[in-house]
Structure formats: C-alpha cells, structure tokens
C-alpha cells in the first residue's frame, strides 16, 4: 500500500470518528443554513460540535434512515407538515417532557409553547418532537419602477390584471396560493384557514379565483427564480419567499416593495430524529436554538421572523439589528400589525389535504 | 433486490392490517346494502384498537389511511385523544358508535367508512389504479378519479411525448454532427469533439440556467430578434417556461448521448463504401440512403435507446424550464417519495415506468433486433 493511501485512510478514519461525536443537522443549505450556523451554532457553548448537512426537504430520507436502522442525522430542519407526520409516524422522537422542563421561558414567564401561541400559532403534534425556528412567508413583491402610477397594495390587486396589467409569478405547488386566492376573493385573512377547513366549496372558490389570472401566470419552482423574473421584467409581480426578497433588498441594493396583506406565514422546526446517534447533545442544542435570543439573532442574517413572539421585542429594542447598521423590522413578516393582515397557514389541514389539493392544482395547471 | 422490493411495496398493504386487525375483520361483515353505517362491533373494535394500539404504529397507519381519503389524519388523531381521555377515567361508553360520532361527526359520514374498504386486504392493486387516475367506489368497483384530480394519465402522456420528441430531435441534430466528426481529419475532429464534450462535462444546472437566460422573453434570443426588427416588442416569443423550453433544453442536454454512439459507429464505416456505390452509378443521395444509412442503424438505435431511457425519467430540467408543463412523471415520484410518503404509489409509478421501458425495448427488439446495438 502506498504511503499516500495510508495517510489518506488514517485521515478519513480520523474525520469519521470526529464527526461521529458531532451533532449532525440536516438543513436546506444556502443563506438559510449560514444564518443558522451563525445564530445557533456559533453562539453555542461548543460550536465545533454542530455540523450542518444539506438536504432537500421531505421525510423520504429520514424514513429510509429510521426504517433501515442506520440513522446518521440527529436533527432535521423540517416544515410543519413534515414535523407533524414525522412525529405521528415515530420518525421523530417525542420529547414533550424535555421541552417542558428544559426550554427557556419567555421574559414574562410564559412557556415556550405559550410564547408560540402568542404569535398566532395553534398546537399540533409536531410540537411534541420539535422546537420552533422561524416564520417564513409566501409574500407578493414587485419592483416599484414597473408601476409609474398607482402601485398594487393588496391581494385583490395581485389578481386584477385589468388594473395592473402584466404577468404574475406563482409557484408550481398549491400551498400558500390557495389561501391568497381566498383573500383576493374577499375573505378576511385571519378567517381563511377556518373557511377552508369548514366551508364546503371553499376550494372551488379559490380555484375559480385562480382561473381569472391563469393566462397571466409564469410558474416557478425554485426559490431564486421569482427574483430573476421580476428583475428581468418577465413578470410585474411575483410570490416569493420573503427571506429572498429581504436579501435582495439588504445585500444587493434592490428596492423591492412587499405586499404584506395576504402573506401566508409558514413554520419551520428543528426535530429530533428517532434513534439519533448523539441524542442528548442534540436535545441540548435544540434548547439553545429555540431561545428567544437565538431566534432574534437569526434575523440578523436572514429576514425570517422568530417563531417565538418574545423574539420580536428583542429586535425592536436593538435596532439597527442588521449587519452594517440597517434596520431589520421593515422586513420582518410577523410584526403585530402585519400579523393582522396575514394568514397563518394551518399545517394540520395541509397534512390532511395536501396531496389531494396538489394533484388538483397540477391538473389545473396542465389544462 | 431493490427492484423486487419496489414491486412488493407497490401492492403491499400488510402494515395497516396489523394495526386494525379486529376493526377490519368486523368491517368485512358490514352489509352496506342494509345499514348505512357499519354495525356497533366495528366502532367498538376501532375504539379498542385506538385506545390500546401502539402510538407510532397508529401514526404510520394514518399516513396510509389519508391516501384513501383526505381527512383521516386529523379525524383519527382527534378521536384518539378523546378515547384516551375516556379510558384514563375508566369511562367506557354504552354505545361505542354514539361515543365516536360525538367525538367527531365524521364517523357518521359513510364516505370515510367506504374509503376504509380500500385497505382491508393485505395486498392491494389500488396504487396501480391511482397511478392511472382510477380509484374504488364504495363497493370496490374500479371507477375513474374525480375529474379535477386526474393528473397522472396526462402526465404519462406528456412524459412519453417529451421523451419521443427529444429522442427524435437528438437524432436529427446528432446525425450530421456525428457524421462530420467521423469524416473530418483528426485534428479538426478532435477540436469539434471537445465542443461536444464540454457541455457534457458542465453541470446540468448551469446548462439549464443558461438556456433560461437565452430563451426567456427578456432574454438573449428575443432581444436580438427585436433588435433586428424581426419581432415587435410586444410580440416576443415565449420559448421557456413551457413545453418548447423543456424540449430545447432536454435535447441539448441529452445530445451527447446520441452523438457519441453514432460517432463511434460511423468512424468504422469505410469511406470506400460510398465511393464504390457512386462508382457503380448511384447518385449521392441514393448511395447515402442505400449504403451509408443502413450501416449507421446500430449507432442510431444505441443512441436512441439511451436518450429515450434517460429522457423518460428526467425531472429536474423540466421542472426548471418547463413552467406549468414541467411536471413529468419523475417529479411526481419525487413528490410522493418525499412529501406525502406514499411509497406505495411511488412504487406503482416506478413499476409502470419500468414496464413502459421494457415494452419499448421489446418493440425495438422486434423491429430492429437487439443484437444490432453497437457502441462502436
């Protein structure tokens, strides 16, 4: 065996045994994971013990790991629907008692879960296995230069191609857009989830509203696309993840305007994989990452909102909070006044009906 | 092995049967003609199996049940909570039926009970039916899916169409290039070969993005055409975020898979054959058609099969450039694998995909003969 090969083998063993002790967090990569690294890992007592790995969302890999018994991830950054299903299926471990005992309470002594409820959230079974991260939203944005006269300001305007001619950018799956269509159709944002859940024919109504702009849509499927679409003038306004728009405004000197009315807030969790190799260290890190301070810290690096209500006052009190002395609050989706005109997406309803609605949405797109 | 596992999964429903064995046993005795709702015994069995069942197993069952009808998940979860509360207090109802209906009125909705019928057997063809937009009605007759949910048949057709077109375009574009490569002097052909291989080595995403820049309405090609006065500013062509975009991008990406086999076959065809044919009085076109072309068939077949097989499973490029037409069958497999965790349906879609490829392979074997494939 050549010397080089030996060195290489030893080195790889060394790396392997080193990484076996580190808590592995599967997350989405890019600017988002970078913000987690800075806000959660770098502020942790032992930053070196946290390792991020990229994944593409969904529970496919987690289920494969758990079913085959070779779990390599400790924590997964999961969407609320996946948090619920993963917890129900036992892919994530139920840590209700540890969350109750070890999580940091809010400034007025409210528990972490109460703190989340103060932000307009309702309990779902994902809360048994996961700790809160951030609010991200489907928000409509536009380039003000594209509208010399009146500027669009509501969901009704987004769906009104007479008043504001031009194409709209919309994503190729149904979450978020169904709720927005309901708002454009005259439902009060805060009432949308209840209407969708309880009124028969509510979905038909949403799809009928979507029909009215169908010929004016450019569909996108990856998060960077809507910014390109609006920048190049391919569309006049688009739905996007608010963090992407915030980054364009803060870091790239763009001047995009948001339409906060009818934004759809979605949640993001950090969940403990069942059979995680470094379980206890992972739980400890979860508790650190879900403190109000850590959540507020993350907003410095990406414009997603803390899911604990008590994170917002920390940002407000310390503006300019952003790097280079910029104010972050103008880009935060969950300020109290914005919450009033927002929809908080109902993950349990989506987890019940998501597959069927997405099939319907695809059939609608294709016809 | 993995293929066998996939085929098993596509018909397997044992997992749910281990969670609700008694309920399903009682369910089979329900006479749907006579009673609108199942008898008390079914409710009782369900109550007990939810009360004493393993939480995780029930959780897994929920994912499965939700495929048969949307809404099972929260229905069972809410009910379980109510049941566990009652059991904790040692309160057992006189009528389990009334208890469940009081806990959630959906237990009085026969459509949920009808949907349960899909799951009572250990093996089920339902995933295959779902994969072609069919489902069961209340009496287990196979019927078509609700109209606004029919997506798979149209996706299958679109996938096949795109694959056939892409193969065809690759052949049309690849043939002259391969011919040129095979007949130029070595130093020129080497240079040309690099031009063929360079994009081949470039990342798929880079090439896809490059096509978007070229083709979009405010993009390079439209810009030049408007500048030249061929198009008016309002009449810009939409060449991307639709099927055209998918075809253009996929053809370019898969082109090397056509050119390389063609090239290696063409290189060994002696040039003297064409000269001899023309010497014997054939016009160049006839000589090409009768002498040259037949000798390239092995290359065309190898390239064609390669491109077709790759195209039929493609999904990243079409999703990026295809807009609303960009969802091919591969996207659905990925969606169900990751998001809905409906691996049964994934397996069924995969099995059908495999079958389609085998059919094409068989047809090909009938028409051209598999021994005829050559990579050089």
Image: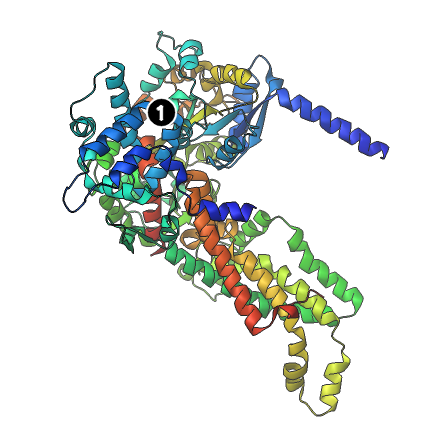
**Residue drawn at 85 percent across, 35 percent down:** A2
Residue underneath mark 1: A125
Is A236 situated above or below B41? Answer: below
Q: How is the image coloured?
A: rainbow
Location of the C terminus of chain A by quadrant is bottom left
The image position of residue A95, as x and y in percent, is: 43, 17
| Residue A230 appears anywhere in the view | no
Q: Looking at the rendering, in which quadrant would you find the N terminus of chain A?
A: top right
- Looking at the rendered structure, the secondary structure element under dot 1 is helix
Q: Residues within 10 Å of mark 1 (few under 14, many from 20)?
A: some
Q: Residue at x 62, y 48 (%)?
A: B203
Can you give x and y, in whole percent of width and height, for residue B202 in the image? 64, 50
- Give residue B27's quadrant in the image: top left
- Residue in the picture at 23% in, 34% down: B42
Q: Residue at x 55, y 72 (%)?
A: B366
How many marks the image carries: the answer is 1
């Amino acid at each position: 065996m050549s010397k080089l090969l030996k060195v290489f083998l030893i080195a790889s063993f060394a790396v392997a045994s080193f990484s076996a002790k580190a808590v592995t967090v599967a997350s989405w990569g890019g600017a988002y994971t970078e913000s987690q690294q800075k806000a959660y890992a770098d502020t942790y007592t032992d930053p070196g013990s946290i390792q991020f790995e990229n994944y593409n969302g969904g529970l496919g890999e987690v289920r494969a790991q758990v079913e085959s018994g070779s779990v390599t991830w400790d924590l997964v950054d999961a969407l609320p629907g996946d948090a619920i299903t993963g917890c129900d299926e036992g892919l994530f471990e139920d840590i209700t008692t540890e969350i109750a005992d070890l999580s940091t309470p809010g400034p007025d002594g409210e528990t972490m879960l109460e703190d989340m409820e103060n932000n307009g959230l309702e309990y779902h079974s994902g809360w048994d296995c996961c700790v809160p991260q951030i609010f991200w939203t489907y928000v409509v944005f536009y380039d003000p230069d594209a509208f010399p006269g009146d500027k669009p300001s509501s969901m009704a305007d987004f769906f009104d191609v007479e008043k504001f001619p031009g194409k709209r950018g919309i994503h190729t799956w149904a979450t978020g857009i169904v709720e927005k269509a309901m708002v454009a159709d005259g439902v009060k944002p805060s009432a949308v989830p209840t209407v969708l859940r309880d009124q028969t024919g509510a979905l038909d109504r949403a799809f009928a509203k979507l029909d009215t702009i169908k010929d004016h849509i450019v569909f996108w499927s990856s998060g960077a696309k809507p910014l390109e679409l609006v920048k190049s003038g391919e569309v006049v306004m688009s739905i996007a993840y608010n963090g992407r728009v915030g980054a364009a405004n803060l870091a790239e000197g763009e001047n995009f305007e948001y339409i906060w009315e009818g934004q759809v807030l979605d949640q993001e969790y950090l969940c403990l994989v069942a059979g995680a190799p470094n379980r206890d260290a992972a739980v400890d890190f979860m508790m650190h990452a879900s403190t109000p301070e850590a959540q507020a810290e993350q907003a410095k690096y990406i414009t997603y909102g803390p899911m604990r209500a008590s994170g917002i006052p920390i940002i407000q009190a310390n503006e300019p909070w952003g790097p280079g002395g910029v104010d972050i609050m103008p880009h935060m989706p969950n300020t109290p006044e914005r919450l009033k005109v927002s929809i908080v997406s109902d993950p349990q309803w989506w987890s019940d009906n998501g597959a069927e609605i997405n099939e319907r949405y695809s059939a609608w797109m294709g016809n | 092995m993995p293929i066998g596992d996939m085929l098993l999964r596509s018909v397997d429903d044992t997992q749910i049967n281990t969670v609700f064995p008694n309920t399903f046993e009682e369910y089979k005795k329900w006479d749907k003609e006579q009673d609108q709702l199942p008898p008390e015994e079914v409710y009782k069995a369900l109550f007990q199996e939810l009360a004493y069942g393993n939480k995780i197993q029930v959780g897994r069952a929920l994912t499965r049940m939700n495929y048969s009808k949307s809404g099972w998940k929260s229905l069972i979860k809410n009910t379980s909570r109510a049941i566990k509360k009652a059991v904790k207090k040692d309160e057992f109802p006189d009528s389990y039926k009334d208890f469940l209906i009081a806990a959630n009125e959906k237990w009085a909705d026969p459509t949920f009970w009808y949907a349960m019928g899909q799951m009572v057997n250990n093996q089920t063809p339902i995933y295959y039916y779902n994969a072609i937009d069919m489902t069961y009605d209340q009496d287990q007759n196979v019927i078509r899916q609700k109209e606004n949910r029919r997506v798979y048949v149209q996706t299958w057709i679109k996938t096949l169409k795109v694959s056939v077109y892409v193969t065809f375009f690759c052949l049309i574009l690849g043939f002259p290039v391969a011919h040129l490569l095979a007949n130029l002097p070595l130093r020129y052909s080497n240079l040309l070969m690099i031009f063929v291989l360079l994009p081949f080595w470039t990342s798929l995403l880079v090439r896809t993005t490059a096509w978007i820049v070229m083709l979009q309405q405010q993009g390079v090609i439209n810009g030049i055409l408007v500048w030249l006065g061929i198009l008016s500013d309002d009449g810009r062509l939409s060449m991307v975020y639709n099927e055209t975009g998918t075809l253009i991008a996929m053809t370019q990406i898969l082109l090397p898979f056509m050119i390389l086999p063609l090239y290696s076959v063409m290189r060994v065809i002696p040039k003297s054959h064409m000269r001899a044919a023309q010497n014997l009085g054939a016009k160049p076109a006839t000589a090409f058609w009768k002498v040259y072309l037949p000798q390239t068939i092995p290359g065309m077949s190898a390239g064609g099969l390669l491109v077709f097989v790759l195209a039929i499973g493609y999904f990243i490029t079409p999703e990026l450039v295809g807009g609303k037409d960009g969802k091919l069958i591969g996207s659905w497999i990925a969606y169900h694998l990751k998001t809905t965790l409906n691996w049964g349906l994934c397996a069924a879609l995969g099995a059908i995909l495999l079958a389609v490829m085998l059919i094409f392979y068989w047809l090909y074997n009938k028409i051209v003969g598999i021994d005829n494939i050559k990579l050089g």
